[in-house]
Image (tube, grey):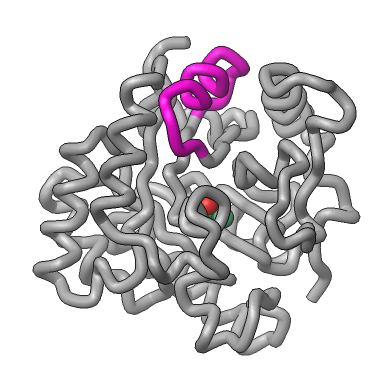
Amino acid sequence: MPDVTLTTLQGLKQKGEKIVMLTCYDATFARTACEAGVEMLLIGDSLGMVLQGHDSTLPVSVADMAYHTASVKRGNRGAMIVADLPFMANATVEQTLANSATLMQAGAHMIKLEGAGWLAESIRLLAERGIPVCAHMGLTPQAVNLFGGYKVQGREQAQAEQMLADARALQAAGAAMLLLECVPSELATRISQAVRIPVIGIGAGSGTDGQVLVLHDMLGLSLSGRVPKFVKDFMGETGSIPAAIAAYVRAVKSVEFPAAEHGFSA
Ligand code: KIV
């Protein structure tokens, strides 16, 4: 696969072809995902839960993220690598710039920040310095204690309008991509249509420009036994990891996944 760049992603959005992203934490899975056609590899701070066994993403450090980003880079064959800034790594502007630089030097092509409109200043500073940013909105797991659990965001009209305004503001600040987690499908579609930049969804319906899942979830692996509604187990129907990832790629590209049952209503 030729290297996936921002131009590639923009082109996919313009022609209405869905973008396939998957979380990935090591070299072997990076190679396997690339061979299956995954276009974006996300080193998510979900690694705190699925690799390290914590009950949230809060204990993950920048060093953890850099280690796994460097591992993914060694196995990557052309996908765009996106790395999460973990909890409190963007507490100040200075920390945001320094920690983003660490992850870019470890091999990331884009940095993902969790938040909302208040991210605008950081996004502007990062973009000015040549770092593409994905703004993760909606259910932002680093704020689980503020939300009182992993709950759908944007169900109320005022919150939905604010999310739409924030999406526009972050695009104007220079965000290269948005990621919407656990947002009503109708709202996610509205936001995707309102911005020029690609919007990736998880638990956000099929109207976004692309999809992401946590690798372990789509392979049917769960430490807690609680499987979110938006997850589909692709391993069960295929029987091998490469085949499961290839089935996920096909299902996203053909818009068979996510189905209505994987989304949320307002
Ligand atoms: O950390 C992660 O894996 C993520 C996805 C859930 C989008 O942010």
Q: Please state which of residues 173 and 67 is positioned toward the viewer in this rendering.
A: 67
Question: Would residue 114 be found to the left or right of residue 214 on screen?
Answer: left
- Name which quarter of the figure residue 257 lies in: top right
Residue 46 x %, y %: 51, 55
Q: Give the residue drawn at x 38%, y 34%.
A: 81
Q: Please state which of residues 180 and 92 is positioned toward the viewer in this rendering.
A: 92
Residue 189 x %, y %: 68, 57
Is residue 211 visible from the viewing direction of this image? no
Q: State the predominant SS element of the stretch in magenta.
A: helix
Q: Which segment did they paint magenta?
A: 24-39
Q: Give the residue drawn at x 63%, y 29%.
A: 17
Residue 146 x %, y %: 51, 88
Residue 11 x %, y %: 48, 28
Q: Give the residue drawn at x 61%, y 88%.
A: 148
Question: Would residue 219 be found to the left or right of residue 76 on screen?
Answer: right
For the C terminus, the image quarter is: bottom right
Is residue 79 visible from the viewing direction of this image? yes
Answer above or below: position of 36 versus 179.
above
Q: Is residue 232 magenta?
A: no
